[in-house]
Image (cartoon, rainbow, N blue to C red):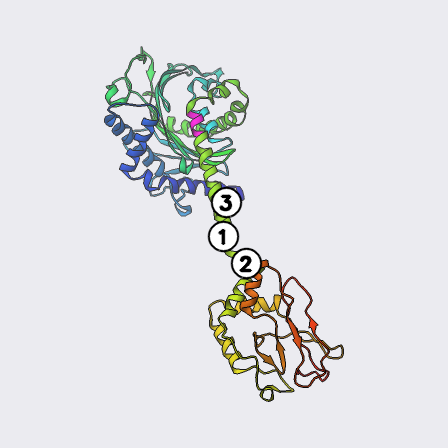
């Protein structure tokens, strides 16, 4: 079930790519074709050639999109969908569809799609290099079914060539051949390579101004029956070692005395076998055969590899930058917390260092002056300061008992503000502003803070605050347990 889910995901990904505006809009397709032709070395007045290739690419993309659909639209066995495709085979490796020709021809249009266990350049090489077809196509002597001739007649330019394929078939059928025109177009920002494969008819008027080549070097049929074919395939990269292929074609093998229904039946049975042969060629033959290794050095495959490599590197760099920016905005260090605390402290107004002790004495609780309470409220109203204050209290503010008999106490520290008294205890160390200036000079915590007893208590001298990584605030609690 998991494997079946993977192939469905890849199929849907290809459907989304084929539905992108660049591959739907006529002007965008024309721009893509023109850019490809110019990059492949075509010069001069190329408008008529661009128009012809654009029309062919648009028709081919429509053929590929005709098999698109969500899970509900996937055809059921021997069922029919809105686009008239019927399902022949559906596994976790491939899917085979067929339908009647939309133009009224008696032969079915066949579609095969599935995984290809090789990089996109290797898959293209196996499909493109017609001179090497003999290495992986069936070569049966009895009954005879094998490739007799497989030659490249003309390399028009990078990504475009003309080949002649001749096949020997069992008696009483005579040999068949196909004059094939290959045209490749790349859309690598979505890891996509399209290849159009169409036959050149003997009756077709071939001119360099419209086709980009002439009939020079192209032999006549010379009594051999030539097939007609329209179609091609699309490859999409999955990862470095795997690709996804969708091939679609309609073929007339010119057998007038054989019923079209029988030809269609045999064709449907052979499609899945073709996928197995292709998989074997991609996974073993192309990886070890010296001829394929030499073919992969061709500028066509080198261009695809280099472009994909650059795009992959750019995506990796962009991803790293995004992660770095996210980390910078989300991480808050102790230094940043301390900085924000001192910023908040500077917003609190200065207060006199003397206070009416009688009003502050309370044996049950520690009270704060109204100025302190008001300053704390102002601080709490500041956006984001509450969290800073809590973080600071847990890291930098601690109250502890100076008496062995008295219990230790950890308090909020909301009322500990420079210059204020808490039940008779005064903090006479540096102010928040002074501390900030001192910290900016040497980044060390001051140890000048001194707590002194007042109002008639027996002074035990100065109690120096021990140096620590962060400043600690101390006060003492009397033996009665109440804050003095």
* Numbered marks: total: 3
Which mark identifies residue 320? 3
Instruction: Label 3: state its secondary structure.
Output: helix
Q: Which segment is the magenta one?
A: 300-304
Residue 327 vs residue 452: left or right? left
Occupied quadrant, residue 86: top left
Residue 234 lies in magenta, yes or no? no
User: Label 2: how many residues lie within 10 Å, few (<14), some (14-19) or many (20+)?
Assistant: few
Instruction: Label 1: state its secondary structure.
Output: helix
Q: Residue at x 33, y 16 (%)?
A: 225
Nearer the camera: disc 2 or disc 1: 2
Q: In this view, does 376 lie above or below 216?
A: below
Q: Which residue is drawn at 68% across and 86% down?
A: 456
Q: Is tag 2's residue or tag 1's residue first in the polypeptide sequence?
A: 1
Q: Which residue is drawn at 46% across and 28% down?
A: 121
Which mark identifies residue 326? 1
Q: Which of 286 and 246 is in front in this view?
A: 286
Which mark identifies residue 443? none
Identify the residue position indicated by label 2 in the image.
332
Residue 302 lies in magenta, yes or no? yes
Q: Which residue is drawn at 35% across and 42% down?
A: 20
Q: In which quarter of the image is the C terminus?
A: bottom right
């Amino acid at each position: 079930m998991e494997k079946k889910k993977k192939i469905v995901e890849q199929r849907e990904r290809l459907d989304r790519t084929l539905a992108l505006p660049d591959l739907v809009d006529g002007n965008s397709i024309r721009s893509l074709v023109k850019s490809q032709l110019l990059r492949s070395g075509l010069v001069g007045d190329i408008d008529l050639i661009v128009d012809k290739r654009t029309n062919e690419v648009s028709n081919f993309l429509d053929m590929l999109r005709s098999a698109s659909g969500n899970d509900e639209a996937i055809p059921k066995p021997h069922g029919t969908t809105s686009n008239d495709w019927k399902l022949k085979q559906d596994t976790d490796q491939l899917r085979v569809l067929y339908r009647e020709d939309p133009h009224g021809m008696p032969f079915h249009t066949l579609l095969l799609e599935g995984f290809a266990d090789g990089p996109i350049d290797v898959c293209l090489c196996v499909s493109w290099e017609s001179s090497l077809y003999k290495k992986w196509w069936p070569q049966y002597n009895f009954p005879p079914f094998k490739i007799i001739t497989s030659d490249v007649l003309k390399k028009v330019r990078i990504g475009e060539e003309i080949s002649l394929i001749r096949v020997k078939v069992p008696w009483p059928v005579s040999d068949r051949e196909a004059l094939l025109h290959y045209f490749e177009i790349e859309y690598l920002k979505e890891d996509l390579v399209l290849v159009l494969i169409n036959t050149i008819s003997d009756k077709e008027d071939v001119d360099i101004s419209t086709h980009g080549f002439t009939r020079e070097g192209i032999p006549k049929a010379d009594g051999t029956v030539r097939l007609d074919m329209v179609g091609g395939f699309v490859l999409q990269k999955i990862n470095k070692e795997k690709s996804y292929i969708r091939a679609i074609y309609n073929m007339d093998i010119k057998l007038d005395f054989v019923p079209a229904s029988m030809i269609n039946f045999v064709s449907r049975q052979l499609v899945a076998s073709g996928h197995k042969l292709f998989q074997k060629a991609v996974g073993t033959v192309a990886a070890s055969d010296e001829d394929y290794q030499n073919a992969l050095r061709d500028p066509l495959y080198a261009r695809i590899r280099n472009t994909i490599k650059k795009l992959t590197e750019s995506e990796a760099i962009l991803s790293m930058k995004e992660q770095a920016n996210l980390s910078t905005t989300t991480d808050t260090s102790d230094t940043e917390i301390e900085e924000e605390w001192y910023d908040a402290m500077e917003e609190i107004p200065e207060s006199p260092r003397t206070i009416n002790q009688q009003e502050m004495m309370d044996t049950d609780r520690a009270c704060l002056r109204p100025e302190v309470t008001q300053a704390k409220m102002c601080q709490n109203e500041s956006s984001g300061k509450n969290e800073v204050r809590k973080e600071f209290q847990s890291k930098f503010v601690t109250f502890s008992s100076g008496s062995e008999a008295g219990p230790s106490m950890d308090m909020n520290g909301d009322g500990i503000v420079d210059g204020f008294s808490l039940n008779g205890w005064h903090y006479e160390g540096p102010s928040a502003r002074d501390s900030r200036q001192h910290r900016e000079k040497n980044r060390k915590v001051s140890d000048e803070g001194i707590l002194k007893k007042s109002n008639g208590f027996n002074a035990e001298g100065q109690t120096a605050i021990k140096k620590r990584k962060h400043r600690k605030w101390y006060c003492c609690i009397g033996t009665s347990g109440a804050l003095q």
